[in-house]
Image (cartoon, rainbow, N blue to C red):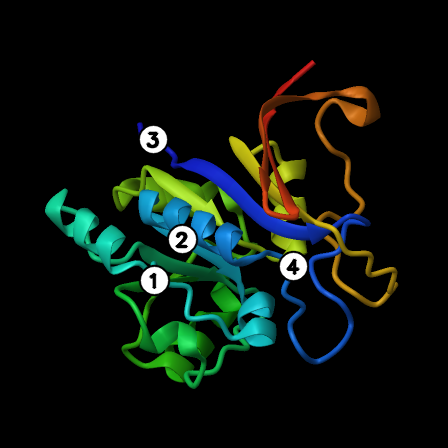
Amino acid sequence: MTTRPYVLLSAAMSVDGYLDDASPERLLLSNTDDFDRVDEVRASCDAILIGATTMRTDNPRLLVNSEERRATRIAEGRSEYPLKVTVTRTGNLSSDLKFWHHGGDKLVFTVDEAVEKVRAALGGLADVVSVGTELDWGLVLDDLGRRGVGRLMVEGGGTIHTQLMAQDLADELHLAVAPLLVGQSAAPRFLGAADYPGGTTARMRLLETRAIGDVVLLRYAPGERS
């Protein structure tokens, strides 16, 4: 039986729950020390996943930036960079995005009707896999497990965080709360409406709280609700 990865959701949000504002420029919620913490977490993982919408909006490279951490990975017999993963239902991906041109191996999960579109758009930039007629997170995690991914870091966006939380597939949650208020209805939120496991009274176990400058890190175990 395939062992699925340990799934860690990571997000920075404003006090009122937003991942960004509605302007064309990305809102930087974290500070320098928290960005370094995220880099450390990335280095500890076998794969990092973001959604196609986040890729198009933020155009991230999604790398381990520390040379020392990359060297440690190599010394441990791992790849220099974690596997970079994205998911798309529509197949609307551009080969010009930074995601494809930095770091190591890339992997795209999509659905049957979009798989040829993605392969044509990306050429040999990534391995492209269909999980069937619908995007099935269980099949995505099974495939990653077969590839040897033991620890998966998910960096958004809000739709993916919502789906994984609602399907009870997240093992750990890292929330960096910034002392900002966004208050814009058009801005993306960390989580959307869903039928979350246990309902409105189920309390997640708190693993850690830590002040990182003016940002507060909250670590929770979503699967351990009471």
Q: CA distance from mark 4 to mark 1?
A: 19 Å
Q: Amino acid at mark 1?
A: Asn
Looking at the rendered structure, the secondary structure element under dot 4 is loop
Residue hosting label 2: 39
Q: Are marks 2 and 3 in contact (CB under 8 Å)?
A: no
Q: Which picture quadrant has residue 193?
A: top right
Disc 4 packing (10 Å; few <14; some 14–19; many ≥20) = many
Q: Is residue 120 above or below residue 195?
A: below
Q: CA distance from mark 4 to mark 2?
A: 15 Å
Q: Residue at x 77, y 56 (%)?
A: 180
Q: Residue at x 75, y 20 (%)?
A: 202
In percent of width and height, residue 67 lies at: 24, 60
Q: Are marks 1 and 2 in contact (CB under 8 Å)?
A: yes
Q: Amino acid at mark 4?
A: Leu
Residue 222 bears which disc, if any?
Answer: none
Q: Is residue 14 above or below residue 102?
A: above
Q: Amino acid at mark 3?
A: Thr
Who comes first in sequence, dot 1 or dot 2?
2
Q: CA distance from mark 2 to mark 3?
A: 25 Å
Query: Does residue 170 appear in the picture of this structure?
Result: no
Residue 29 bears which disc, if any?
Answer: 4
Left or right: residue 70 compared with residue 89: left
Q: Outermost residue toward the bottom? A: 96
Q: Residue at x 38, y 34 (%)?
A: 4
Residue hosting label 3: 3
Q: Which picture quadrant has residue 80?
A: bottom left
